[in-house]
Amino acid sequence: MKGDIKKLLEKIRNSDEGTKKKWVVAASSITMAIVIASWLLLSNSIVKPVNETTSQKDTGIAYQSIMKEIGNMTKKLNSANSITIEK
């Protein structure tokens, strides 16, 4: 197994630039798909679906607090990246 991987890598190293680019695109696509799939599975395990017993009021309060925090973070980022020019 280890020898097969070494042979494949050596074959790719000795190939032309077009083939190397194809391997990079293929490897990047596969890696991206694995990362996105892992992220989706993780987010599904963290965020529980809202069941029928949860009231609309509770959901609205949670949504409002999340949006408030996002607004606060945005303000902090904007103030940190702003430049004041004084004469």
Image (cartoon, helix red, strand yellow):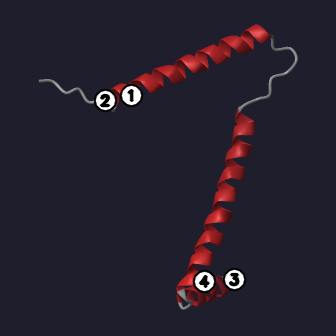
Question: In the rendered structure, which amino acid carries the disc numbered 3?
Answer: Met
Q: Which mark is residue 78?
A: 1
| Residue at position x 33%, y 29% in the image | 80
Cα separation, mark 3 vs mark 1, equals 52 Å
- Element type where label 4 sits in the image: helix
| Residue at position x 50%, y 21% in the image | 71
Cα separation, mark 3 vs mark 2, equals 54 Å
Where 57 sits versus 29, above or below? Answer: above
Where residue 85 sits, quadrant-wise, is top left
Q: Position of residue 67 (x, y in %)?
A: 58, 20
- Element type where label 3 sits in the image: loop
Cα separation, mark 4 vs mark 3, equals 23 Å
Where residue 7 sits, quadrant-wise, is bottom right
- Element type where label 1 sits in the image: helix
Which quarter shows the N terminus?
bottom right
For disc 2, the marked residue is: 82
Query: Which comes sooner in the sequence, label 3 or label 2?
Result: 3
Decide which of 46, 27 is in the foreground and name it: 27
Q: Position of residue 82 (x, y in %)?
A: 31, 29
Q: Position of residue 11 (x, y in %)?
A: 60, 90
Question: In the rendered structure, which amino acid carries the disc numbered 4?
Answer: Thr
For disc 4, the marked residue is: 19
Q: Which mark is residue 1?
A: 3
Question: In the rendered structure, which amino acid carries the disc numbered 2?
Answer: Ser
Question: In the rendered structure, which amino acid carries the disc numbered 1?
Answer: Asn
- Element type where label 2 sits in the image: loop
